[in-house]
Amino acid sequence: MPVCTGCGRTLDEIAEWRDLGMDERTTVMRRVRRKERLDRDGFVLVPGVLSAAECERLRSLIEPAADGKPGSRTLLREPWCRELAHRLAERSELGGLLAAGVVPWQATVFDKSIETNWLVPFHRDLSVPVARRVDHPALRGWSEKEGLWFVQPPTDDLRRMTAVRVHLDPSGEQDGALRVVPGSHHVPDPTTDRLAEPDAGDAAAAVVVAARTGDVLALSPLLLHASSKRVGEGRRRVLHLLYGPRIASFGLAPPPTA
């Protein structure tokens, strides 16, 4: 099929584009720009993915898991959470941000308040939960948390994963919102590259990702991120979901959820 040397599209793709209405073209271009920002910066905020009613329902569903604790890593055991994870992967607003065929690997709730308040220094999310332990020299950092095996998979696997944070409350700087270092996911191997270790320069380059209730933040697990303690009353509840390939290197797979 001939390809346009200017835009790189096939003639069939160009014909399909011409058949789209203005609203459809705007939607497509918005998805393209979001994917470009995710690839370039390592994160992108998508506003208004969930309605206020949906967020209210989710706040009530996570309450038993929170139960006065900072969070829980095992929410995918809950049917409502598995349904939400699959529904989010199909949302048009997130089109292109998640690779085709990905499945949820983990769902964590973070409930930050005056009673359960903490700060997190800059770090990358290098450990993921898996179905079983696999002994191989390339697999490091084995640990067990809440009955799940965690491991640091090869960096190539982490590059194929995307985290999705669903904001169930407003999250601004006073609420302990996430701070990220744009572009910091572009590292050869964060497990061995000493230049990938966080330093004072990263803190200076960080930006606060303020979000409203219902907004969704997509980010690379390799992106340097941190958060401060919450200041003031109220709560900052976030559902953090990790998506990845059905099977990763060395047969690694997500934990069973049924």
Image (spheres, rainbow, N blue to C red):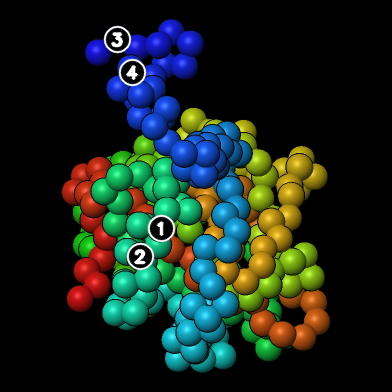
Instruction: Identify which amino acid the numbered label 1 is placed on.
Output: Arg
Residue where numbered disc 1 is placed: 91
Q: Name the element at disc 2.
A: helix
Type of amino acid under label 2: Arg
User: Could one spot residue 139 in this view of the protein?
Assistant: no
N-terminal of the two: label 3 or label 1? Answer: 3
Circles 3 and 2: CB distance less than 8 Å?
no
For disc 4, the neighbor class at 10 Å (few under 14, some 14 to 19, many from 20) is some
- The type of residue carrying mark 3 is Pro
Residue corresponding to mark 2:
87
From this view, report whether residue 254 is shown above or below residue 197: below
What is the distance, in whole Å, between disc 3 and disc 1 at their CAs?
32 Å
Q: Residue at x 60, y 53 (%)?
A: 45
Given the image, on which type of amino acid does mark 4 rest?
Thr
- The residue sitting at 49% across, 30% down in the picture is 188
* Distance from the alpha carbon under mark 3 to that under mark 2: 37 Å
Query: Is mark 1 in CB contact (under 8 Å) with mark 2?
Result: yes
Q: Considering the numbered disc 3 on the image, is that residue within a helix, a strand or a loop?
A: loop
Of mark 3 and mark 2, the one earlier in the sequence is: 3
Q: Which residue is mark 3?
A: 2
Residue that appears at 47% across and 39% down: 21
Residue 156 point in image, percent of width and height: 37, 37
